[in-house]
Amino acid sequence: MLGRVAVADACRVMSDWVFMAEPAQLLPARSQMAFTLMFHIILVPMGVALPAIMLIANYKGLKHHDPVALTLARRWSHAAGLTFAAGAVSGTVLSFEMGLLWPGLTEKYGDVFGLPFAIEGIAFFLEAILVAIYIYGWRRLRGWTHFWLGFPIPFVALVGAFSIISANAWMNTPAGFTLDANGKPTNIDPVDAIFNKALPLEFAHFVLAAYMAAGFMVASIYVVGWLRGRRDRYHRLGILIPFTVAAVVTPVQMVVGDTIARWLANNQPAKFAAMEVVTQSGSDQPEILFGRYDPETNTVSGGVRIPGLNSILTGGSRDTYVQGLDVVPPEDRPSNVDIVHWCFDVMVGIGSLLLLLVLWFAVAYWRRREVPRSKLFLWVASSAGVLTYVAIEAGWIVTEVGRQPWIVYEIERTSDAVTSADGVWVSFAVVLVLYAVLGAGTVAGLRAMSRRWRRQDTADGAVPYGPRPDPEPEVESAGRAAP
């Protein structure tokens, strides 16, 4: 019975996608863009937040003459360099896709929201230069000189993230122009477009998510080693430094996320109604966890209902009015309410679990100044990095699918912006192969680094600054020194 229901649901979801895919290029274009975005976002937190984590370890090592912290900083910088390079490739593909897949957007509104992409390009090249100098500077520069040369990297990374989030936020709250009688943008103000209404909250939400993802992911690697009995100081610092960074930003993220949900209820009520699967407008709205939405009858079946909680969370009272999908024309509703709603529940559920994990960590560390001993804590902490990435992917799906059918909210439909060229399925196949190779290469590179570091003693960071030792001369089989 459950199998038949699952098949029926899958068929209904696919039929919804096919129904949306008019013109014919819309489905492959959206699929390709979704895939590349979901791949690229795996690498972004490492480019945004890992530099800050490695610099914290670098500072601790220099300040307290701690060779273990310096070893961690140097190794994390190599991982940051590799993930940054992979992110550069996947991000370049995305930049081409914006123009190739969505010419109706870039041709019409490029003058309005194009400036952030230019800023992001400058920030990208500057970050690449600084990362290269920082990695090359190990054992070639004085300690504090090397540290201060790396100090700007996290801030440059934030500039790049700011630019891209600004462009995305503009698509949610378009500003900086007026439309003439022919529907063309005039009176363009790029600065007003950059600093649109959605930018502050969306930027804060993403940056905090990036620091959570990088912190929990890096810490989880060392938690796995801790579970396997490697209880040395190297693994202890490998857990405490990144986990503390993630722990500090997690409560702030929950506040920001709640603020965004309230903001959406007032500024994008159709998206909010899909997120909370509110079908009928009114007060005393229940909070529905999961469940299945029927677009034909505008009803929800299944799920767990908590009476009045949605209205309380939205406005502080059960009397708070919440707009539902009933007042939104069917053609203007989000393209798949189930996807938006389920991803929202997954994101909030994971965030709540991580908040509990952080509180557990804070209490345990305050009492013992040590990594918590509980096996349950360690098992959850070892999964925290993956869970955070799942939450990030779910959050982007909520943002992008929830805005549909609009590519520019309530101004231009996605179907009007898509390319009319043939061959999008072919380009999608090429992108799949390219990203499979890129992903496999990145994982192989990180694993090779890990294996090499495992073979080395942690004391190899004891003198990370200053001249490197001369390599031992190679010896031929006959016993003579090789030339």
Image: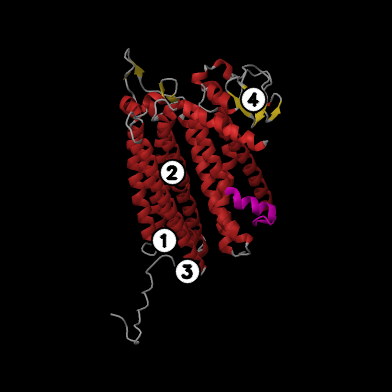
Above or below for 233 versus 415? below
Circle 4 Cα neighbour tier, 10 Å, few/some/many (<14 / 14–19 / ≥20): some
Its colouring scheme is secondary structure
Mark 1 touches mark 2? (CB < 8 Å):
no
Label 1 or label 2, whichever lies nearer to me, is 2
Image position, residue 29 (x, y; %) = 40, 33
Considering depth in this image, is 18 or 285 the residue closer to the camera?
A: 18
The three-letter amino acid code for the residue at tag 3 is Asp
The three-letter amino acid code for the residue at tag 1 is Gly
Q: Which quadrant of the structure image shows residue 359?
A: top right
Say whether disc 1 or disc 2 marks the residue closer to the N-terminus.
Answer: 2
Mark 3 touches mark 4? (CB < 8 Å):
no
Which residue is under mark 2?
40
The residue segment tinted magenta is: 367-384
Separation of residues labelled 3 and 4 (CA atoms):
60 Å
Res 285 seen here: yes
Which residue is under mark 3?
460
Which residue is under mark 4?
300
Circle 2 Cα neighbour tier, 10 Å, few/some/many (<14 / 14–19 / ≥20): many
Q: Residue furthest right?
A: 307
Where disc 1 sits, the SS reads helix
Separation of residues labelled 3 and 2 (CA atoms):
33 Å
Mark 3 touches mark 2? (CB < 8 Å):
no
